[in-house]
Amino acid sequence: MISKPAKTQVPIHELIAQRWSPRAFDDQKNVSHEQLIALLEAARWAPSCFGDEPWRYMVWNKHNDYEAWQCAFDCLSEGNQLWVRYAPVLLLATSASHFRHNGSPNRWAAYDTGAASENICLQATAMGLHAHQMGGFNAEKIQEAFSIPAEYHCMAMIAIGHQAEPGMLDDILTQRELAERTREPLSSRFFANAWGMGITAHTHEF
Ligand SMILES: Cc1cc2nc3c(=O)[nH]c(=O)nc-3n(C[C@H](O)[C@H](O)[C@H](O)COP(=O)(O)O)c2cc1C
């Protein structure tokens, strides 16, 4: 199986370094009930503004309810369907538009839901599973198909399962699967003291 650890200037925690978003999933290997609950618990314990826990997730397991999984799958973009068809589990992350405690708009809901989803991805990595988040789906279609109330915004779908050999994918996807993972340099995204003052491993004034 491929491992594509993050290349960093100083060591980071292995769990974070090892997480990545594969497309080759093993159709035959299911995610156990206990693993699924662990993934959801990981999201549940994410921090959130005012402790609102604005996320709501839907879960579909191909091996338990194929029809429902297929209905969720049908909402994905064609490009994502090419590889998600092998993933046993699909999740949908939604976030509430308003706070529970005072009904005012919650502008941190997407931020909090993203944190919960990353918890899921890291928990998956810790358990030897893989998770791949997707924005490529029809939000209106899935909202209607599953009667998701309008106050919940559909943020991302997440494919989860066991990794398979990249050769199972078509040529283009196999190339992507084998491609190096890259990131912009630290200094282009992280600033010390003033906007644009890029941080490097050698910056000490912060
Ligand atoms: C919100 C979000 C939406 C994404 N949408 C897609 C998608 O529709 N299809 C896809 O193949 N990957 C999608 N990705 C995966 C990213 O392409 C991937 O995380 C990024 O290239 C970095 O690669 P890595 O996760 O392996 O580090 C998405 C990731 C996030 C967080």
Image (cartoon, helix red, strand yellow):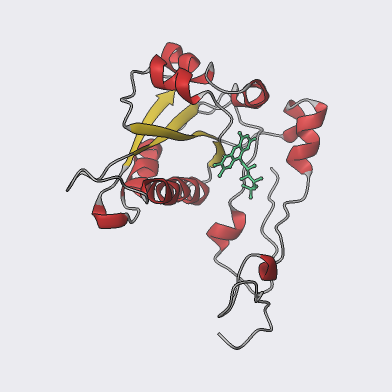
* Residue with the most extreme left position: 101
Q: Residue at (70%, 63%) from the top-left corner?
A: 7
Q: Position of residue 137 (x, y in %)?
A: 55, 26
User: In the depicted view, which residue is nearer to us: 79 or 96?
Assistant: 96
Numbered disc total? 0
* Residue with the most extreme top position: 67
Q: Is residue 74 left or right of residue 172?
A: left
Q: Position of residue 187 (x, y in %)?
A: 68, 71
Q: Quadrant of ligand 1?
A: top right
Q: Position of residue 19 (x, y in %)?
A: 58, 51
Which of the image's four quarters has the N terminus?
top right
Q: Quadrant location of residue 82?
A: top right
User: In the depicted view, which residue is nearer to us: 175 or 129?
Assistant: 175
Q: Residue at (47%, 49%) from the top-left corner?
A: 118
Residue 14 seen from this side: yes
Residue 8 seen from this side: no
Q: Residue at (33%, 26%) from the top-left corner?
A: 150
As displayed, is residue 175 above or below residue 18?
Answer: above
Q: Is residue 65 left or right of residue 179?
A: left
Q: Quadrant location of residue 168?
A: top right
User: In the depicted view, which residue is nearer to us: 160 or 143?
Assistant: 143
User: In the depicted view, which residue is nearer to us: 111 or 8?
Assistant: 111
